[in-house]
Structure formats: structure tokens, C-alpha cells
Amino acid sequence: MTHSNSTTTLILGATSAMAEHSARLLATDGDALFLAARNPEDLAPMAEDLKVRGASAVTILPAFDALKPDTFADIINQAAPFDRVLIAHGSLPDQEDCQDSLSKIKQELQINFQSTVDLCTLCAEKFIDQGSGTLAVISSVAGLRGRQSNYIYGAAKGGLNTFLQGLRNRLQTKGIRVITLLPGFVDTPMTADIKKGPLFISAEQAGICIHKAITKSKSDIVYVPSFWRFIMWIIRSIPEPIFKRLKL
């Protein structure tokens, strides 16, 4: 199940800032890494850096596009067998720009929900055949309660959280871990247009949290960073009649 006696990790959406910083730490561990992204040519410098950091092998896979689900199986088959999968792709849509457009809503749900469900299903089949494995998926705290400022994105992540919970329940007796990663505010290119506040952390800090969740933590649901567990507990505790009046 490993390549060159190393732990093998497949990263889907490898050019995302959080994925890249997570990959650096996995490289330091000596992992064999398979990288997939929408623009594979952008992965070449990253691959060289990961080799220098200690990765036992780095393989760049064909273009991964969340809007082209027919290509998913081939990409996963080229990386298998693997010990771990980190799914890190996604988009952060402008709520007002897409809330009245059925086509844009459909596209965002495909990117942030359906494509990840497809990938998880395909990877789960591989892990079941192998008898073990770890599937870690970057979701978002936005999926824990619908807010007027991002409910399209939140709906996709909320659906994803529920899917992962059910998948985890199904696979827990088969030696397969399913980890839901719930970042809060992370300073990445995806959040470049959002005013940064004290709750923001760097992509590097997020990568440290994700690496720990994958390699050391036993938790099924991991907040990135951990203080978001308490923030979301408060937000989810607000009664709906009050919550719907808040400008969030």
C-alpha cells in the first residue's frame, strides 16, 4: 500500500495555500506525494521544493478540474494505492453575484459539494479494497450555520459535513478514518478580498493544524484552529428568531 516503503499521500487541490503548507510538513515526514491541481504546470516548483524538504517521491498527476467529474477516476487510479488522501480544492463565491443565478449556484455546488462527494466515494472504494486508509477533507465552519452573507457556500459545506459524517459512520468498522477539517478565517488568495481581523490565521498555521490532524490527532472533526469550536458553539446556540435578525 506504500511507495518505496513510505507513507503515500494523494493531495487533490494541491496548489491551494493550505494544501501546500500541509504538503511541506508531509514531505518533511518523508511521505511519497501525489499532487493534483487544475493547472499541473503550477506544481513543478512546488514538487521540487517538496523533494528538497524530504519527500521520498513527488508525482504530478494530470489536470484535476472539479467541473470535469469524468476525469476523477483516472486521476485517483494513477495515484493508487495510497495511505492517505487530502482533498483541498474549493472556491469562495461572491454571495450577491451568484444568489440569483441558477447556473452560478449549480457551478458552486458542483465545486464545493458534488465534486468532493464524488472524490470521497472513489477514494473510499480504494481504501475498502486495501483494508485501511485516511481520508481528510477540508470543509468549512461556514457549513455549520446558514448566514445571509455566504449561504450558497455554506450550503455546499453543510451538505459536505453531513456526507462526511455518514461516510465516517459507514467506514469506521473497516479501519478507515474520515476526517472533517473545519477552517475558520484563513489568509489565502481565496480570501484576499476579505478584510482581515484578529480571527484570521495564516495558511502556514492552518497547514500545521491539518498536518497534525492527519498524522497525530485521533479526532474525527478538527477545527482549524481549535478555538473555532467554541466560536461555532456560541453561534449555533443562538435561537433562530434572534439569529435571523443578525447581520451576519
Image (cartoon, rainbow, N blue to C red):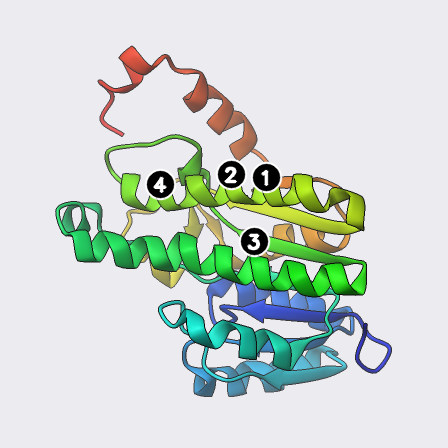
User: Would residue 26 appear left or right of 184 to someone viewing this image?
Assistant: right
Marks 1 and 3, how far apart at CA: 11 Å
Q: Is residue 169 above or below residue 103?
A: above
Q: Secondary structure at mark 2?
A: helix
Residue 37 visible in the picture: no
> Which amino acid is tagged 3?
Val
Instruction: State if disc 1 and disc 2 touch (CB < 8 Å).
Output: yes
> Which amino acid is tagged 2?
Thr
The crowding category of the residue bearing disc 3, from other C-alpha atoms within 10 Å (few below 14, some 14 to 19, many at least 20), is many
Q: Is residue 76 above or below residue 168?
A: below
Marks 1 and 4, how far apart at CA: 15 Å
Mark 2 highlights which residue? 162
Name the spot of residue 143 as percent of width and height, x first.
42, 38
Q: Give the residue at the far left of this rendering.
A: 100
Q: Secondary structure at mark 4?
A: helix
Name the spot of residue 20 as percent of width and height, x first.
55, 68
The crowding category of the residue bearing disc 2, from other C-alpha atoms within 10 Å (few below 14, some 14 to 19, many at least 20), is some
Mark 3 highlights which residue? 137
Pick whichever of labels 1 and 3 is earlier in the sequence: 3
Instruction: State if disc 3 and disc 1 touch (CB < 8 Å).
Output: no
Mark 4 highlights which residue? 155
Mark 1 highlights which residue? 165
Quarter of the picture holding the N terminus: bottom right
Marks 4 and 2, how far apart at CA: 11 Å
Name the spot of residue 160 as percent of width and height, x first.
47, 45
Instruction: State if disc 2 and disc 4 touch (CB < 8 Å).
Output: no
Name the spot of residue 133 as percent of width and height, x first.
75, 59
Q: Secondary structure at mark 3?
A: strand
Q: Is residue 35 above or below residue 148?
A: below
> Which amino acid is tagged 4?
Ala
Marks 4 and 3, how far apart at CA: 16 Å
Pick whichever of labels 1 and 4 is earlier in the sequence: 4
